[in-house]
Image: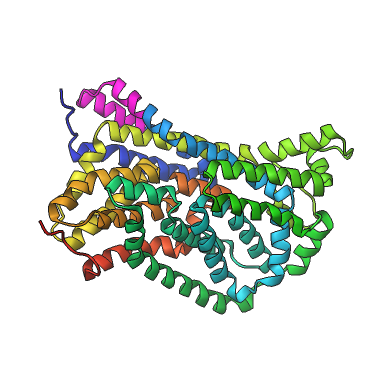
Amino acid sequence: MTQKTPHPLIAIIPVVVLIGFLGIVITLFGSDSLNGGSQIALLMGMAVCVSLSMTVYRVSWHTFEKQVKKTLGEVSITLLILLCVGMLAGTWMISGVVPTLIYYGVQIMSPQFFLVSACLICALVSVLSGSSWTTIATIGVALLGISHALGISEAWTAGAIISGAYFGDKMSPLSDTTILASSATGTGLFTHIRYMVYTTVPTFLITISIFFIAGLSGGENAVVQVDEYTTGLAQKFNISLWTLLVPVLTGVLIARRVPSLIVLFASSVMAGIVALILQPHILCEVAGDSTASASTLTRGLAITCYGSTAVDTGNASLNELISTRGMAGMLNTIWLIICAMCFGAAMVASRMIDSITGVILRWVRSRTSLVASTVGTGIFLNITTGDQFISIVLNADIYKEVYRKEGYESRLLSRTTEDAATVTSVLIPWNTCGMTQSTVLGVSTLTYLPYCFFNLLSPIMSVIIAAIGWKIKKIEN
């Protein structure tokens, strides 16, 4: 028996419930909403979706179980990456890698050109690594530390870091989202990347221009705390260029196209070895024992990997900057991702996603409306499914046949999907990307959102280029 597609007015109910509960949670808990309240909202939305489907459309519970298992299986590697990101953040900080980068960075980078430099550096690293997550968790964290010392807004800095990282992620042949978008639409990888140039490069040029102007206009008012930061770091850590071997070797692994999970884990191990050699006194402080015995150092290193660390430099703001939460700091994010995946799985299994997007397709009348609908659906899927990978795949599945019937090349669909689903995921608080980057940077999603100019402008640019018709042609039968 063929499963019936729910009526759009029924299909939208779980989404409305989710948004309503999220609004209540944010009102009640504010920035603490990701510590449990948002998870409850997602599960309530899932419960409404399942209840309606089972009672009104007779969808079996087995159908939901099967989809949840499939969805969670697909996101399992993401959860492991998150744990490794937490471990890497702790080891890079305690080993002195990030403090060394901050120490030299605050002395080299000018406040006036910091934002544009941060954006360009993250773009380069992300192109080479193919991962916005790895870029933000490593060089992004260091740049955020430098911005604190230079007195530059963390919201602006996070926006510059994320904008650069997601530009590089889109344009890198090593990126999982780039590979996924091209394969899901049946487009050659490098054909897909070359075609993205027409929307991505103009957007990035506008983005760095904004950061350049913002830096020039705001740099003179920056409260420079360089001396306080450099003195505090030098007194507490063994600042050494030898620590930079860790990011260099990490870059070598990335260049050799080693999988991200392996790179993050190996980099954490390397940083742990450096901590044992150069920062044993810090490990003792983390362990709470001044005796530098093997057991104390082992305990300190273990806590660095999995737990919270607090090192006293004599400067309150610097103490907050170099504190880490290890793998344990990622558990709320993982918890939220699991709940988001369950909600997305329920929407897919019940075919409510199909129903809602079917309404959107009715408005397609031209090339511009087709691209605009694809963009809107990608953003909608990011909101409802909570994961960019699911959004990319569903967007491709929904529109693949439509683009073929309208006579448009598959590369137009793959590019539009990336312009919408990939870059906007980080702007949604309960999406896996939004949750991860806000956790890693320590800046809430809604705080950095207005300054992620690349991510905000990419969907708009995609529609504008479609309206102009630049490099868009129909396939001749």
The magenta segment: 45-68
Q: Is residue 64 magenta?
A: yes
Which quarter shows the N terminus?
Answer: top left
- Residue 97 in view: yes
Which quarter shows the C terminus?
Answer: bottom left
Horizontal and vertical percent for residue 239? 79, 58
- Residue 41 in view: no
Indicate left or right for 288 with 305 as reference. right
Horizontal and vertical percent for residue 58? 21, 22
Q: Is residue 120 above or below residue 246?
A: below
- The answer to which image quadrant residue 409 occupies is bottom left
Q: Which one is in front, 256 or 76?
A: 256
Q: Main secondary structure of the magenta part?
A: helix
Horizontal and vertical percent for residue 31? 53, 48
Indicate left or right for 271 with 26 as reference. right
- The answer to which image quadrant residue 293 occupies is top right
- Residue occupying image coordinates x 20% and y 63%: 368
Q: Is residue 102 magenta?
A: no
Q: Which one is in front, 31 or 249?
A: 249
Indicate left or right for 64 with 57 as reference. right
Its colouring scheme is rainbow
Q: Which one is in front, 241 or 86?
A: 241
Q: Which one is in front, 32 or 202?
A: 202
Horizontal and vertical percent for residue 201? 39, 68
